Image (cartoon, rainbow, N blue to C red):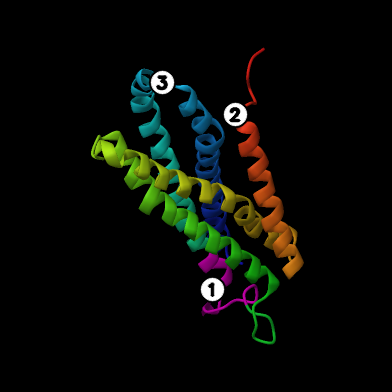
Amino acid sequence: MSDWYSNIHLVVRWLHVIAGITWIGHLYFFNFVNVPLQGALDDAAKKAVNPQLMPRALWWFRWGAMITFFAGLFLFTQLYMYTPGVGFGPSTLFSDPAGGLTDRAKWILFGMTLATIMWYNVWMIIWPIQKRLLTGKVPAADIPAVRRRAFLASRTNTFLSGPMLFGMLAPSHYSAMSAGALLLAVGLGAAAVWFSIRASSSVGKLA
């Protein structure tokens, strides 16, 4: 493997991981910290806090998602759709000798599918709605329904994040793909998020 290939892979993978941490970290902040916080604030406090907090948090959130998404597409192309010295086309990591998908490829495609849904929710639903809310462009009568739509998109992303991360990590740490493993990834991920949401309103309180 040539040095340029290895070096580019290292830099983009590092960028993918750092941006992913930023994205998912802010996703968890919004769902596990900010949702209970907003419920505890009165209207005056929200008007004082949110114009300072939300634009900054949403900036890191949405651009973390964007960089994660496109760095991930680059890595997928480099690893699964390119072979050094051969050129573009399915690599041995993507196709098995019989011409089918490898288990590694199945896992990464599973993770990528969920990540794509999450990216769409961020850029096409959550951010446009939050931008309209923060700039006062939503009619007062529509605010509850609009907020609800953004909330549901964010909650969906939170529940998808566990299985998505499993799918991204499985190719390197758990290459075998089966229906049982897939159900386990989805079940454990959803359960972890559900318990975290349940606990979010009570943890961290000072005695």
Mark 1 burial class by Cα count in 10 Å: few <14, some 14-19, many 20+:
some
**Dot in front, 2 or 1:** 2
Spot occupied by residue 150 in the image (x, y as percentages of width and height) = 41, 45
> Helix, strand or loop at disc 3?
loop
Name the quadrant containing residue 119.
Answer: bottom left
Q: Which residues are magenta?
A: 76-94
Report the label total. 3
Is residue 77 on the magenta stretch?
Answer: yes
Spot occupied by residue 108 in the image (x, y as percentages of width and height) = 61, 64
Q: Tell me which label, 3 or 1, sits earlier in the chain.
A: 3
Residue at the top extreme, as displayed: 207
Residue located beneath label 1 in the image: 81
Residue at 48% x, 62% y: name it.
74
Left/right placement of residue 23 relative to residue 103 reads left
Name the quadrant containing residue 186.
Answer: bottom right
**Amino acid bearing label 2:** Ser
**Mark 3 to mark 1: distance in Å?**
53 Å
Against 204, is 187 above or below? below
Spot occupied by residue 93 in the image (x, y as percentages of width and height) = 65, 72
Is residue 72 on the magenta stretch?
Answer: no
Name the mark on residue 201: 2
Spot occupied by residue 90 in the image (x, y as percentages of width and height) = 56, 78
Q: Answer whether residue 66 is visible to the viewer in this image.
A: no
Toward the viewer: 145 or 90? 145
Name the mark on residue 188: none
Question: Image quadrant for the C terminus?
Answer: top right
Residue located beneath label 3 in the image: 42
**Mark 2 to mark 1: distance in Å?**
45 Å
